[in-house]
Amino acid sequence: MIKVLSLGGSIIAPEQPDTDFLEKFNALIRAYLDRDSNRKLIIVTGGGGPARIYQNSYKKIINESLNDQADWIGIMATRLNAQLIKAVFADICPGPVVYNPTETGIFAGKIMVAAGWKPGFSSDNDAVLLAERYSGDTVINLSNIEKVYTDDPKKNPDAKPIDSISWTDFRKMIGDEWIPGKNVPFDPIASRHAEKTGIKVICASGRNIENLENILEERPFIGTVIG
């Protein structure tokens, strides 16, 4: 059985690699895989702090910045984070980091690590494509938010947390346009493809290790189900 994690860069490296989180994540994932020899995981990494810092620098230098160029900067940050995750799991992740989710080799070992592919969407979309390719019905999207809200709770005190929402209603909230660095719970392009292919997404806090274990083990959890 294969599960897909879209591991937000804000969790891996909010400014620099979060070693404390990565140690706990490493222990959790190894314990989860050890409990059943049939289990495998695909981990798709986001760009996090490095992507944001370098994209902002580019936008300050070039007044009329291009989305494709900003995307490529973000993609390279996802690949740096992916290489770190692969190194942590090197003994059970023998394959190279996957850059193109439509062209993957044999899934050797227990873990496959993937990163950003090309401009036009975030690594969330790569996670959906890999779930589709390997017959997964769910993408677990881990970020620094516990649930999806009706609005940005930092700006709107009346924003309410959502336990579950349809793709139709979720896409009305976030729109259809992808802008590099766009701060939404799940990429609009990935959302459109997930709806089309019938893939469910769980949005939850990546730093809550106990809750992540509950999600992986299909126990009650804190988060938002989209789909």
Image: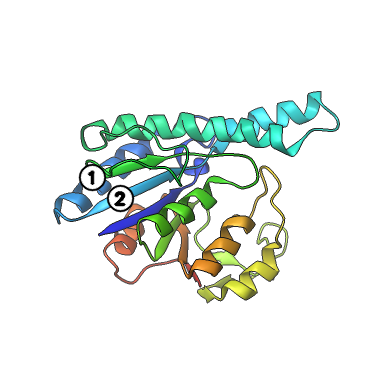
Along the viewing direction, whichever of 13 and 76 lies nearer the viewer: 76
* First-in-chain label (1 vs 2): 2
Q: Is mark 1 on a helix, strand or loop?
A: loop
Q: In which quarter of the image is the N terminus?
A: bottom left
Q: Residue 56 location, x and y as percent?
A: 71, 31
Q: Is mark 2 on a helix, strand or loop?
A: strand
- Identify the disc placed on residue 41: 2
Relative depth, front residue between 99 and 224: 99
> Of the residues shown, which amino acid type is indicated by label 1?
Lys
- For label 1, the crowd category at 10 Å Cα-Cα, with few meaning under 14, some 14 to 19 and many 20 or more, is many
Label 2 Cα neighbours within 10 Å, binned few <14 / some 14-19 / many ≥20 = many
Do residues under tags 1 and 2 come within 8 Å of each other at their CB atoms? yes
Residue 182 in the image: above or below residue 140: above
Which image quarter: residue 219? Answer: bottom left
Q: Which residue lies furthest to the top in this view?
A: 61
Residue at x-position 55% and y-position 30%: 76
Q: How far apart are marks 1 and 2 (CA)?
A: 6 Å
Q: Where is residue 27 in the image (x, y as percent from the top left)?
A: 24, 43
Residue 122 at what x, y percent from top left? 58, 46
Q: Which disc number belongs to residue 110?
A: 1
Q: Residue at x 25, y 33 (%)?
A: 94
Q: Residue 78 carries which label?
A: none
